Image: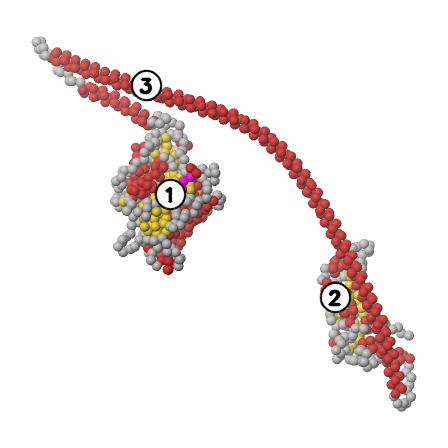
Amino acid sequence: MEAARGKTPKKPAVKKGFPRNLKEPVGVYCRVRPLSFPDQECSCIEVISSTTVQFHPPEGYYKVNRTGNDKETQYSFKQVFGSYTTQQELFDTVAKPLVDDLIHGKNGLLFTYGVTGSGKTHTMTGSPGEAGLLPRCLKMIFNSIGPYQAKRYVFKSNDRNSMEIQCEVDALLERQKREATPNPKTPSAKRQVDPDFADIINVQECCKVDQVDEDCVYGVFVSYIEIYNNYIYDLLEEVPFDPIKTRLPQSKILREDKNHNMYVAGCTQVEVKSTEEAFEVFWRGQTKRRIANTHLNQESSRSHSVFNIKLVKAPLDADGDNVLQEKEHIMVSQLFLVDLAGSERTNRTKAEGNRLREAGNINQSLMKLRTCMEILRENQMYGMNKMVPYRDSKLTHLFKNYFDGEGKVRMIVCVNPKTTDYEENLQVMRFAEVTQEVEVTRAVDKTTYGLLSGRRFRNQIRGGLIGDEALVSEVGLQSFPPLPLCEILDINDEQTLPRLIESLEKRHQLRQMMTDEFTRQANAFSALLQEFENAVRNKENYSQGQLSEKERLISGQNLEIERLEKKNKTLEHKVEILEKTASIYEKDKRNLQQELETQNQQLQRHISEQCRLETRLQGMVAEMTTKWQKECDRRVAATQLEMQNQLWVKDEKLKQLKAIVTEPKMEKPQRPSRERDRVQDKAARRSASASPANAPPIGVRRRRSRSAGERWVDHKPASNVHNETVMQPQVARAITVSVPSEKALAKCEKYMLTHQELASDGEIETKLIKGDVYKTRGGGQAVQFTGIETLKQQSPGGNRKRSLSAAAALAQPDGLESELTDVETRCSMAVEMRAGSQLGPGYQHHAQPKRKKP
């Protein structure tokens, strides 16, 4: 379709080789309903041509909706029917071609689509005096096949969407059983028409399909279902009445037959023989259909109704008497007449509860139908291969085959020109715009049965000749003049014999005339028969020539097939050789790839080993460098400390000498013993090492009494690594600290520092540095180290590269390793805690060598 004042987008070019002639678009028609009150309402739709309608927005519409576009819009259809179009005109244009295709074995699908109150049901069903499309289709079908219908129950449907042919005996038994039933389920053609729909099916126009195959018999089956809330219900199903428990109708399911066609499993199919009988079945199902009173319509359809007309066609035998019993000769065609539920916004219907849920399901199913149409259009126009979501809705899933090329598809879009329906009508127009751009595959004519035509007519002629001969004999005898009385009572009677002779001569003349007429007609018939035989012979000769030509063509094709088969075998042999060669190459390729992967793994392992060795050597070099650097620093510090001690001792002696010299001589001092001098000298040097240069000399160190038992300060690092040795430090009555404090040193007499480091062979070595705790003159505590114990795990062979303890030590973070190896820092924290000192603990005592006793 196209919009006003704008160009229609150009469709992409069809690909080369695409069978365009085998496709036809979906036929979309538009029907405008007349206004209910022309004087009170204004129309928003104008029919400007036989194919175009124009929409006028109502006054104030765009101010309310704020769309910013107040232009009229035009939409084009295959044909537009105005408000004064009759039902017969609509039927002749839209539905009559579908009925013609149905008689000739092709399927059809007809939709009516629109908002509630737009005239969909009126278009499909009709009203009294104005029959709709459905009764007119039924009338045309039975007008066309009336004389050629099969007897009831000759055709029988099964549960697999196919038909079977019963023999005459079985059909007769079922007919007798039906006549014996007091209230048969299927209506009878002899019953009186129901007055409720008698005016609806009263069609004055007589429509008939031309060129009906007279050598076939036909049967018509109808079914009626509804799709309600995306469930399928059979409207013709007879539910037994139960006064105790009401039985609700069961939903039907969709299945696929052997020809991949969708059908409703278990759906009731009724065989009908007349228009009245078929419409009675429809009316019976219509009373069960779900309708409700909404704000827009007093009897609004709340479901999609689907009325199916199935036409079964089977040929007569060669004699034209009976139906062929072969199942493959049965031809079944269907015509679906679908009345869709109204599509409108739920806020306009003022629906609540169940009505609101029904409206939501209706809009959802119609939206699924529109989605399928849009994807079909995209696939066809742009060469895409998107999957069409037929299964999302029962409505689209049921008619999936029609959009894939099962038959013709026609849609009648019904619109109401009221201004209140303007926005809903725009949505309907957009859907119609998408639909008529979808193309479906055109149905092709099915093959014939291979029997001569005119079988039924020849059988009637044969039966008619016998009856005509008897009729001619009877008429001939009646046309002869009556014989006079032959009784002679008088010898002189001269009138009786002449009258008898005259009568016999008249009879003879009449007989001669009749014989001549019969001979003439026989000769004429013989001439016609000879002419017919000549025509048959000519046709046979022509057929024989055609057959011989076809045989020659087939023989040539057979030779070509043989040549192609030989060529195919040769190519298959070559392909087999190439496949073997390719398999050999593939095997060699896999072997080479495996070998390459093995070498890559070996190279990777070699590189990893080199990296590990390089890392180990770098670690050993760094360890040795750090160890020697610390050793050098320790020696330099020890030398400096020793020199400072010597200098301090000399200064102290000079101070004492100066004090002795400058001090007034009171009395003669006593010379202290050698042991006392030695103790004082040692205490002086110890206090000099822990005190600043200007500090006063430290007094004699005093050890605590050991009568109460020794108590240790166990100075361990924050994270200690277990080195898997048997000899572990077990210290009784110990205060374990990670940072020594003055309070802990004041309570103990012994001090032990635990230190761990990596040895040169990669093992963890634990050293226990022991010392004694002394009180200083400044009020603090001093520690004198007295010995070192070493715990180390070694391998007996000496070839062990790395033990578990080494790996655990290497796994520790760098900060922890530096903490374990930094002995000087940790020792300086445990030497002295002097009260009131701002310099913190001492840091020289760990390097002071232990003096030997003289």
Q: Position of residue 614 (x, y in %)?
A: 77, 55
Q: Residues within 10 Å of mark 3 (few under 14, many from 20)?
A: few
Q: Secondary structure at mark 3?
A: helix
Q: Where does the C terminus fall, quadrant-wise?
A: bottom right
- Earlier-in-chain disc, 2 versus 3: 3
Residue for badge 1 = 27
Q: Position of residue 666 (x, y in %)?
A: 89, 90
Q: Examine the structure image and report whether residue 375 is included in the region drawn in magenta.
A: no
Q: Residues within 10 Å of mark 2 (few under 14, many from 20)?
A: some
Extent of the magenta region: 23-30
Residue for badge 3 = 530
Query: Mark 3 is on which residue type?
Result: Gln
Query: Nearest the camera: 136 or 236?
Result: 136
Residue 408 higher or lower than 35, as above or below: above
Mark 1 in CB contact with mark 3 (< 8 angstroms): no
Q: Residues within 10 Å of mark 1 (few under 14, many from 20)?
A: many
Say which of marks 2 and 1 sits in front. Answer: 1
Residue for badge 2 = 819
CA distance for labels 2 and 3: 130 Å
Residue 827 vs residue 536: left or right? right
